[in-house]
Image: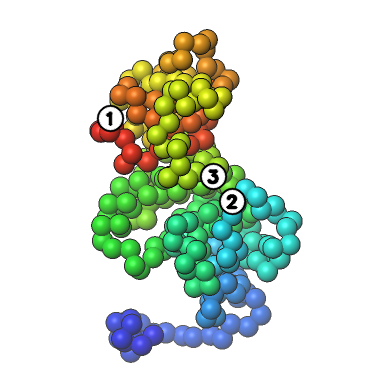
Amino acid sequence: MDRDYFPVQLSDMSAKLEFRKLEGDSLQVGAMKVRWEYMQHPGATLGFRVETGEKSISYITDNEFLMGYLGNPLAVEADEGQLAPYRKVVDFISGSDLLVAEAQYTNAEYPSKVGWGHCSVSNACLLAKLGGITDWIVVHHDPQHDDAFVEVRCSSGTYIRSLARDIALACGSRAHLRSLERLSIGPYKVEDATNPETFDPDADLRILTPEDASSLGLRSVGLIDAGLTTSFINGGKIKAAAFTTLDGGMSAIGCESAVFGVKSDFLGVIHLGSDGPTYHVVMPRSTLSGEAP
């Protein structure tokens, strides 16, 4: 790359470098077989898959999977025609023990970046689902993100937690999303995540009250302990006994229910099962009135 854009030149590298022209679709490097495939990007970009024994890693960056698709990833079936241009990429990563792949744009950012060669979060999750990926390291963020976005939203794992909670389970992916700093984010798992369907943050659901819940056919339940609010926001496992009915009815087990905190803040919508909640919508922490620590 030109020094104006990348400070390290080939002439700066003291190692002995050997270049090979890539011919065919694979080569053998010691015990490793290296395969490659072209990705969806305005400039020619290759993804790589390294296989050794029964283990494999796929590394694909600069890849705009399902370019221009803004819909619900749940609506895309594996045999749909719109996937035809991307079938080679899906087949290429399928069954990898580890996927390293980008999810550069948030869903809110992506509509203005279509065709730039990078993936939206939900479309990247769909790729992981279609490839049967169980472990996925998410890379890339938009270079326009400032330090506050990266340090505050990413370093603690909250950004990746929210991606997992709001999107990955909806795609049916069992991938474990790691933090952007390649650090563990604790015991959080995608199977504990939220399936948000379609949620408009400006809709009336944002200020739902128990009375509103009743008119929508929802039960109203509350958390019995303020200390559980953070766990709820993060899509954690909470026992059914931690919820109490607020509408005077019988047990809400088996019902779609609106959840309220001890200060009557609307927290989200769940299906309350006997072993705990299945999350549908979780309100952003910023909408709460300081209940959570």
22 displayed left or right of 16: right
User: Does dot 3 land on a helix, a strand or a loop?
Assistant: loop
Mark 2 crowdedness (10 Å alpha carbons): few <14, some 14-19, many ≥20:
some
Q: Are dots 3 and 1 in contact, CB under 8 Å?
A: no
x, y (%) of residue 89? Answer: 63, 66
Give me the disc on residue 198.
3
Query: Would you call the spot at circle 3 few (<14 residues within 10 Å), some (14-19), or many (20 or more)?
Result: few
Vertical comparison of 138 with 24: above or below: above
**Residue at the spot of label 2:** 72
Q: Marks 2 and 1, Cα distance to the nearest angstrom?
A: 32 Å
Looking at the image, do the residues carrying marks 3 and 2 touch, with CB atoms under 8 Å apart? yes
Marker disc for residue 35: none
Q: Would you name the residue on which mark 1 appears?
A: 291
Quadrant where the image shows the C terminus: top left
Amino acid type, residue under disc 1 in the picture: Glu
| Residue ID at (53%, 39%) | 195
Residue 146, percent across and down? 28, 63
> Given the image, on which type of amino acid does mark 2 rest?
Asn
Circle 1 crowding by C-alpha within 10 Å: few under 14, some 14–19, many from 20: some
Quadrant of the drawing holding the N terminus: bottom left
Q: Nearer the viewer, residue 132 or 84?
A: 84
Residue 100 shows in this picture: no
